[in-house]
Image (cartoon, rainbow, N blue to C red):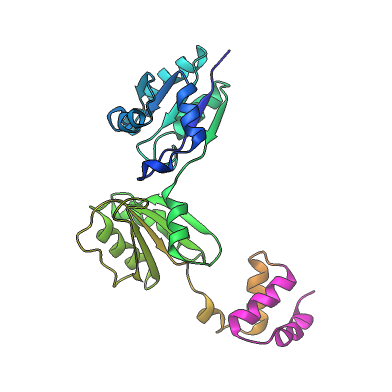
Amino acid sequence: MAGILYLVGTPIGNMGDITLRAIDTLNNVDIIACEDTRYSSILLQKLEIKKPLVSYYLHKEKSSGQKIIELLLAGKNVALITDAGMPCISDPGAILVAMAEENGIECTVVPGATAVTSAMALSGITRRGFCFLGFLPEKNKDKENLILPYKNIDIQLVFYCSPHNINEDLDFLFKILGTRNVVVVKEITKMFEKVEKGVLGDLKITEPRGEYVVIVEGKDFSSELCDLSIEEHLKYNIQKGMTKKEAIKATASERNLAKDVVYKVALQVLE
């Protein structure tokens, strides 16, 4: 009978954020697969967990993954951890999960800390939803191809950035997205955790250190929409998937009008 693959979230900075379930899982599996065995050994030593470790990192995902699949097929339970946070979220793991599924191996998740949701909580941005795009590619053309499909959506865009690229990435985001509010969260859960708020094109990070999460506000359609007639504005919101009632409420709010004014127009133009 095949073993089980556990995707185990680990702390992103503060080791106190490890969960009881994660500790229990790491204690009970047969093998722990690590992005960097040397780095993970620090956490495991602190937790007094002694298990055989195997390496599973970005540039060897397929070959390392095959060895892990063989262990699982032999009946071994394997936990996959990365250097910090959740496997598969801008970290190795997705290929191994796909390989496990192809081989009929059970895969389950042991949730833990992740920088993207922690940064959103710290940002104080209340607009609905966000779109997480991970690390920007190295080449400008690839960056542009990644961002452009999301340029005109009205929810937050969230990116991970290294200290070496943070200011270059902020400049590029300004070039593509224009002037927008931006929140930069540094070193989440660590001693030098910091939240900086500003505007794309103005905000610069002095003496970059540590890892960053960048949150860019979605496109603000309010001024453009108010150039439309009330009828056109209503139809725009309906096309976005809103119900008639939701479209009336949103249109009134976006135009700073009383709902009954928009409702009268809706009666005439919406079935």
Which residue sits at x=27%, y=29%? 38
Closer-to-camera residue (165/32): 32
| Residue 62: quadrant of the picture | top left
Which residue sits at x=30%, y=51%? 211
52 to the left or right of 226: left
Which residue sits at x=54%, y=60%? 129
| Residue 34: quadrant of the picture | top left
User: How many marks do you count on the picture?
Assistant: 0
Task: Quadrant for the C terminus, please.
Answer: bottom right
Which residue sits at x=64%, y=75%? 250
**Is residue 84 in the magenta section?**
no
* Residue 153 placement (x, y as % from top left): 51, 64
Residue found at the far left of this picture: 207
* Residue 135 placement (x, y as % from top left): 36, 49
* Residue 165 placement (x, y as % from top left): 25, 54
Closer-to-camera residue (191/271): 191
Above or below for 233 versus 86: below
| Residue 225: quadrant of the picture | bottom right
Task: Quadrant for the N terminus, please.
Answer: top right
Above or below for 170 versus 35: below
Q: What's drawn in magenta, residue-wise?
A: 243-271
* Residue 239 placement (x, y as % from top left): 65, 67
Above or below for 267 versus 98: below
**Is residue 264 in the magenta section?**
yes
Closer-to-camera residue (124/243): 124
Q: Most prominent secondary structure in the magenta stretch? A: helix
